[in-house]
Amino acid sequence: MKKYIFSAILFIFFNKVLAQQKYWQQKNDFKIEVMLNDVDNTLTGFEQIEYFNNSPDTLNFIWIHLWPNAYKNDKTAFSDQFLENGSTAFYFSEENKRGYINQLNFKVDNIHVVMEDHPQHQDIIKILLPQALAPGKHIKIETPFHVKLPYSFSRGGHVLQSYQITQWYPKPAVYDKTGWHEMPYLDQGEFYSEFGNFDVKITLPQSYIVAATGELQNESEKLKLKNFANTNIDFVDKVAPTKTLHYLQNNVHDFAWFADKNFNVKTDTLLLKSGRVIDIYAYVLPKNKKYWAKCITNIKNAITTKSNWIGEYPYNVVSVVDNASKVQGGMEYPTITVLTADGSEASLESVINHEVGHNWFYGILASNERIYPWMDEGMNTYYDTRYNNLFATTQNKKNTFLAKRIPENIEDNLLNTIYVLNKDQPINTNSENFSMVNYGLIGYVKAGAWLKKLETELGIEVFDKLMQTYFEKYKFAHPQPQDFRQIAEEVSGKDLSTIFNLLNKNGALEKNAIKKVKLASFFNLKQTDKYNYVSIAPSIGYNLYDKIMLGALIHNYSLPPTKFRFIVSPLYATGTKKINGLARVEYNFSPTTKGDRLIISGAASKFTGGSFKDSTGTENPLQFSKIVPSIKYIFAAKNARSTIKKFVQIKSFLINETTINFTRDFVNNIDIITYPKEKRYINQLQFGVENNRALYPYNAIVQAEQGDGFVRLNFTGNYYFNFQKNGGLDVRLFAGKFIYTGNKSFTTQYKTDIYHLNMSGAKGYEDYTYSNYFVGRNEFEGFANQQIMNRDGFFKVRTDLLSSKIGKTDNWLVAVNLKTDIPKQINFFEMLPFKLPIKLFADIGTYADAWKKGATTGRLLYDAGFEISLFKNVVNIYVPILYSKVYADYFKSTIPTKRFQKNISFSIDLHKLSIANLFPQANF
């Protein structure tokens, strides 16, 4: 008896195990009727969902995605991620450009159900089932709905009366063997939905041409589309104001449609190997008609190659839509894709191939893209490469300057760059955790390279058999990474642990080969896997003393960067007839595996900083040179999506200057002028933090400097308060303290004068580290004298003619600088036919001397006026309008004429041309 009982237990156990291992998935069949209102930009609809519970579990509720609510306000996951990725376009959008879904009234089998909000996301709700849904049973879910379509910030919405209707209807979340997969709508991170059959009826004004998922059932409308080239065909029914289009499609997991009055329709058919004939449609905007001329051929090639390599395209129609939205790239939906190319045939061919390819990786093999983006984007990218080797139009066939130096696959250079900088992430990272840069470089490019590595390991024939087997087993299903690996090992007969383990590792897939050194002109980013380039280019410079300087620029900067980097630029000065120049060498590496960086560098420069004309009329150049050794440690961010950077840096400035020395020869009764060389040094320690987030970015630096006889301490912080798209209030806070390390005397005061704290922006002769560019560093008249630099109190007014400038101190100083864009609502400059980059500034500050008894200035100083910012804030022009009385008195007494023009100041900040400043979100 015990034997039979034991056998029965084993039988039950193994049956349970087999049941657990058997693949299952839910099924959702949709019937949707929807009407477009192109005046209010709204949809009004009704849907019925037949929900089949094919799981072994009993369900008491169902999560429902209401993804139009992603555009409801600035508290959604979409809005948050959009900001994290560097865009304030949605956050500061007008209310009429946002969207939502409402007027929901869910019933299950004709019984009203309770809806519960998701605890975190506004675009997800839970419906509580009136009765538990047992395995093998099905229910009918129905609801009306109303959608306010947003402006096309992301994938769906409208641009005027061109409509991109995507992720628009209530849809259940996926329930699979790991449970529910409710997820908010995101711009970075795609989707996961249940397969089913769609029956959709779309009502809209007669004048629209519609492209949609599935097969159009209206024969008269199909005839119009296929005969679009016949100018006698009229889409507008003069009797009925609207039309209802009926679409059917089985075995898909989404439905999208696009409507525009101006589409040009191109059609053809394609005969597949099985003998099936499918319809091909392209919906082209008139402005792009010329470079879409070959789009049908591109679509055919994409369908043919993927059908041969992976498995035959199973649907009867494929459509490609020209997107009126400015969003670059494309987005795939079952049987249809929408895309925007850059205006060239080559770009269009590439995007069409990629997006049509998603019919396999996303449409038919429907992995969870949010968790495993590599399973659709990476696999699809691998096939992009195979396609490009056969068909793709070469972008750089023209023998242009850039074509010779920039590879078509520049993404490989960028990928290798993030390896070098230790900023990469494993391929098996989910979409939400990728940095914006890595989502493309890792999820697409590296994942595609990983699949190529798998092909190389197996051989092309075995690899193709693997992919065809994978397709046949999991088409119209939700394969997981382990499913793909299982088939790969079964087909190949190999243990592929080594290759599949790479999915979870950082770093390059292949070891770096030893590179040769090669000369290049200007720069070269081609074949950087083989060569370390030393590039030579012409170089030019200018200042008032050296005049035009001509020379060469020799460097090894490239993508990816090498650990050892150098740049040398010798320059011949046509004015002084001197050899000037600058140079920098650095060793840049990661001392830890977590991504910290250590930069050991040395820099040098030599230029003319002034000129003195003696009694004979001879110009004597006053040159300076400096050597700057430096060590900088950059701390790794806590995660790849963090925009926070922290660093500590130690520098020494070893400066050699030509000075003027006047002596009197009393015997011969003449003045003797000599030009001795003087040496000085400044040691500098900095601690810095910056956050380059799109909303309210900030940075702060604490700095200590030590030189002969003094210590200079200061804090500089900047905070930007966005109040509109591309506009806000910039607040800068400065606090400084000057300390004598010995006894204070007239001699030490005079000796350390250039290091004292300034309320006004520092002049060229006060740039004691020679770190800023000045047109005329030591000019005391003319426009060059009006240049200042962003340092200390940074007031825009100047009191250069005073022996002791207003606001200059050898004690302490505090200042606040405000700079704001003019809000659009009150900016009368908006009426101009051109954009004037004008801002308002205001400065307020105080310093130690103002608090002394008998001080001649008020305790608080201020100025305010207009600022014109040019070339990404590299050049700024300041026009003071209001200022403290002490400044007004100075101007009246010292500037009798042309006071307005002479009070204008300007700054030139070449540091803002750095990659980090121009592209802060790149996070390189």
Image (cartoon, helix red, strand yellow):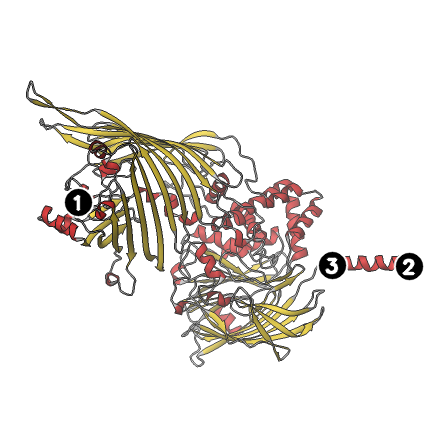
Q: Real-space Cα distance between discs 3 and 2?
A: 24 Å
Q: Real-space Cα distance between discs 3 and 1?
A: 83 Å
Q: Which residue is mark 1?
A: 799
Quadrant of residue 629 in the image?
Answer: top left
Report the label total. Answer: 3
In the depicted structure, whether residue 601 falls above or below residue 259: above
Judge the density around disc 2: few (<14), some (14-19), many (≥20) Cα neighbours within 10 Å.
Answer: few
Judge the density around disc 3: few (<14), some (14-19), many (≥20) Cα neighbours within 10 Å.
Answer: few
| Horizontal side, residue 313 vs residue 416: left or right | right
Judge the density around disc 1: few (<14), some (14-19), many (≥20) Cα neighbours within 10 Å.
Answer: some
Residue 115 coordinates in the image, percent (x, y): 57, 73
Q: Is residue 226 visible?
A: no
Q: Which residue is mark 3?
A: 20
Which residue lies most toward the bottom here? 239
Residue 414 coordinates in the image, percent (x, y): 47, 43
In this view, the mark in front (3 or 2): 2
In the depicted structure, whether residue 83 falls above or below residue 557: below
CB atoms of marks 3 and 2 within 8 Å: no
| Horizontal side, residue 908 vs residue 63: left or right | left
Quadrant in the picture for the C terminus: top left
Q: Real-space Cα distance between discs 1 and 2?
A: 105 Å
Q: Amino acid at mark 3?
A: Gln
Looking at the rendered structure, the secondary structure element under dot 3 is helix
